[in-house]
Image: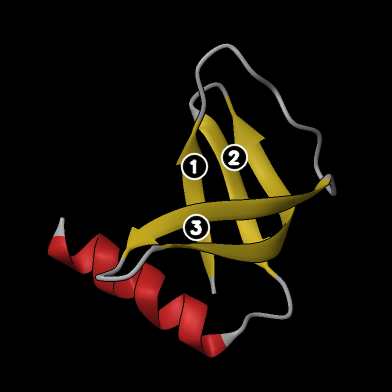
Amino acid sequence: EGMFVQLQGSELPVQAELQISFFTAGPARNREHRMPACVVHGNEDGVGLMLRHVDYRDFHVLRYMINAA
């Protein structure tokens, strides 16, 4: 339950707490999904994030989006 996020021109310290946010489009409206995360490692290309307290409905939507890409 984590991800690597590529960053350009930004640095985040290890153990930084942040929130992942993304949108999905629906027939009636767009929906925002949010997941708390913590930086567990980083390098010049980006950071590794550990997702915290994941709502599995949001996690399923995120996995679907990644697999469809």
Q: Is residue 33 left or right of residue 50?
A: left
Residue 12 % position (x, y): 74, 31
Separation of marks 1 and 2 at Cα, in angstroms: 5 Å
Circle number at residue 38: none
Q: Secondary structure at mark 1?
A: strand
Residue 4 % position (x, y): 49, 49
Amino acid residing under circle 1: Val
Residue 66 % position (x, y): 27, 61
Q: Please tell me how crowded label 3 is: few (under 14), some (14-19), or many (20+) other residues with Cα within 10 Å.
A: few
Q: Is residue 36 above or below residue 12?
A: below
Residue 69 % position (x, y): 15, 55
| Residue beneath disc 1 | 5
Amino acid residing under circle 2: Val
Q: Tags 1 and 2 in contact by the CB under 8 Å rule? A: yes
Q: Secondary structure at mark 2?
A: strand
Q: Please tell me how crowded label 2 is: few (under 14), some (14-19), or many (20+) other residues with Cα within 10 Å.
A: many
- Give whichever of discs 1 and 2 has the lower sequence position: 1
Q: Which of 44/54 is in front?
A: 54
Separation of marks 2 and 3 at Cα, in angstroms: 8 Å
Residue at position x 64%, y 80% from top? 54
Q: Is residue 23 left or right of residue 40?
A: left
Residue at position x 20%, y 67% from top? 67
Q: Is residue 65 left or right of residue 41?
A: left
Q: Tags 1 and 3 in contact by the CB under 8 Å rule? A: yes
Q: Is residue 19 above or below residue 31?
A: above
Separation of marks 1 and 3 at Cα, in angstroms: 6 Å
| Residue beneath disc 3 | 3
Q: Is residue 40 above or below residue 67?
A: above
| Residue beneath disc 2 | 47
Q: Is residue 49 left or right of residue 26?
A: right
